[in-house]
């Protein structure tokens, strides 16, 4: 049957999202991920029979953290685990790997997602022979050959805003919108959120007003902002006005999210055994891309374009857009390019409110899109995320009411 070669999302959960130093500040990422997997197994027992755990992690202690997560969750030692590092796009990359394995017939049941703990992010140190060595060490990896700045992602977002002429007033509308929509969407997302270690809420959501957004100090000075652009990028005699603040840029967060990928082959087998399962969605296609690392937020926008070109759909065909709103400039540029899509864009709020636990965010986008599709009766959901160093990843979902009985 044609459906046997398809990839479906059976279900999934995310944790609450904690601020650095917040509700998960003493919970190791592998412990948080393991607790979430156990919560998933309580709802979908068949997921404990997965053939592999594939998950993202960006700022952990190194090594194969997914292996630790799997063993702590009680999964058998015979089950392999793979940790993926595509920075912010790690969980999206994990889902893409899972999609490819199932689509090619190499697997039928996988757990994909990611975990992150910025609270426990380790400080590392280069060897003295490395020219980047400093006695105090570092916490942020190098993403591009032209800079080792620990503020590279912030610099990329400010540079992008300056390059495209996105001003402070335009950016500050997005955190207000995100926090208001997120605060109103708690019940919508409740079916995909697990309370772990006593957590009770997403800690980043707060009362954000236009006045509060305006009062936030900028993260760069005017001189620093001007220095972000190369000589050929600067306008003659142009005055530089900083735009980025702690309101229109993401803070740092802890969290975990996993989804269950299953093949149409296995769904048919379960059905034949009298154990039919109704998946949440079909995973239509996946995409990854690269952009100039100096303008890394553009990775999310380019990925969306690639996905729709691959699937021969248009932006008008998509009912739900879930772009990772790590910086308001991503949403501002989306709004400029696709003004007719705003009624379908992050209508439950975005990462400026919920937060962005790097290695898990791609799976969080997936779950939010699924909840919104279910509530709004939509068919297609597009998820896209930019990654440090100028990458992007994403996927297109189709709600299962429209694709399977």
Image (cartoon, rainbow, N blue to C red):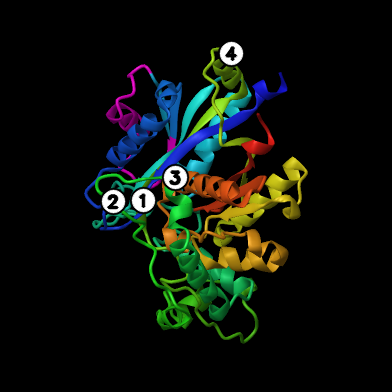
Q: CA distance from mark 2 to mark 4?
A: 40 Å
Quickly name the residue at label 4: 272
| Circle nearer the viewer, 1 or 3 | 3
Q: Return the mark for residue 199.
A: 2
Task: Say left or right for 67 vs 23.
Answer: right
Cβ–Cβ under 8 Å for marks 3 and 4: no
The answer to whether the residue labelled 2 contacts the one labelled 3, judged by CB atoms less than 8 Å apart, is no
**SS for dot 3:** helix
Name the spot of residue 173 as percent of width and height, x first. Answer: 54, 75
Other-residue count near label 3 (Cα within 10 Å), few / some / many at <14 / 14–19 / ≥20: few
Q: Which numbered disc, 2 or 3, marks the residue closer to the eye?
A: 3
Label 1 – label 3 distance at C-alpha: 12 Å
Q: CA distance from mark 2 to mark 1?
A: 7 Å
Q: Of residues 70 and 221, which is closer to you in this image?
A: 70
Q: Residue at x 63, y 52 (%)?
A: 320
Q: Where residue 251 appears, x then y in whole percent?
A: 39, 63
- Residue 16's tag is 1
- Residue 63 visible here: no
What segment is highlighted magenta in the picture? 55-78
Is there CB contact under 8 Å for labels 2 and 1? yes
Q: Is residue 268 shown left or right of residue 354?
A: right
Q: Nearer the viewer, residue 228 or 98?
A: 98
Is 66 part of what is drawn in magenta? Answer: yes
Judging depth in this view, the residue of 268 and 124 nearest the camera is 268
- Compare marks 1 and 3 and give the one earlier in the sequence: 1
Q: Is residue 134 a member of the stretch shown in magenta? A: no
Q: The residue tagged with tag 1: helix, strand or loop? A: loop
């Amino acid at each position: 049957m044609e459906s046997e070669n398809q990839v479906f999302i059976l279900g999934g959960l995310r944790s609450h999202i904690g601020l650095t130093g917040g509700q998960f500040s003493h919970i190791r990422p592998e412990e948080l991920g393991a607790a979430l997997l156990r919560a998933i197994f309580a709802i979908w027992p068949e997921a404990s029979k997965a053939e592999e755990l594939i998950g993202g992690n960006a700022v952990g202690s190194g090594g194969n953290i997914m292996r630790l997560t799997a063993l702590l969750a009680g999964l058998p030692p015979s089950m392999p685990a793979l940790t993926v590092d595509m920075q912010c796009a790690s969980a999206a990359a994990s889902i893409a790997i899972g999609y490819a394995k199932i689509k090619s017939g190499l697997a039928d049941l996988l757990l994909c997602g990611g975990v992150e703990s910025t609270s426990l992010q380790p400080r590392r140190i280069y060897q003295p022979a490395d020219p980047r060595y400093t006695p105090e060490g570092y916490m942020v990896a190098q993403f591009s050959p032209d800079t080792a700045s620990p503020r590279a992602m912030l610099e990329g977002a400010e540079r992008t805003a300056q390059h495209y002429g996105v001003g402070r007033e335009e950016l500050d509308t997005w955190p207000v919108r995100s926090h208001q929509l997120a605060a109103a969407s708690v019940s919508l997302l409740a079916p995909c959120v697990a309370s772990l270690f006593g957590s009770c809420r997403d800690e980043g959501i707060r009362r954000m007003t236009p006045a509060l957004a305006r009062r936030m100090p900028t993260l760069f000075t005017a001189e620093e902002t001007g220095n972000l652009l190369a000589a050929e990028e600067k306008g003659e005699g142009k005055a530089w006005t900083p735009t980025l603040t702690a309101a229109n840029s993401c803070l740092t967060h802890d969290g975990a999210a996993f989804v269950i990928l299953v093949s149409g082959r296995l769904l048919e087998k379960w059905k034949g055994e009298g154990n039919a399962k109704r998946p949440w969605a079909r995973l239509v296609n996946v995409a990854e891309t690269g952009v100039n690392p100096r303008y890394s937020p553009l990775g999310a926008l380019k990925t969306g374009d690639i996905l729709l070109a691959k699937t021969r759909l248009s932006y008008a065909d998509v009912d739900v857009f879930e772009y990772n709103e790590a910086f308001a400039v991503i949403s501002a540029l989306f709004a400029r390019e696709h003004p007719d899509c705003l009624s379908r864009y992050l209508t439950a709020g975005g990462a400026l409110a919920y937060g962005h636990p790097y290695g898990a965010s791609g799976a969080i986008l997936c779950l939010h899109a699924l909840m919104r599709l279910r509530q709004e009766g939509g068919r297609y959901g597009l998820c896209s995320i930019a990654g440090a160093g100028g990458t992007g990843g994403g996927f297109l979902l189709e709600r299962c009411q429209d694709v399977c009985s």
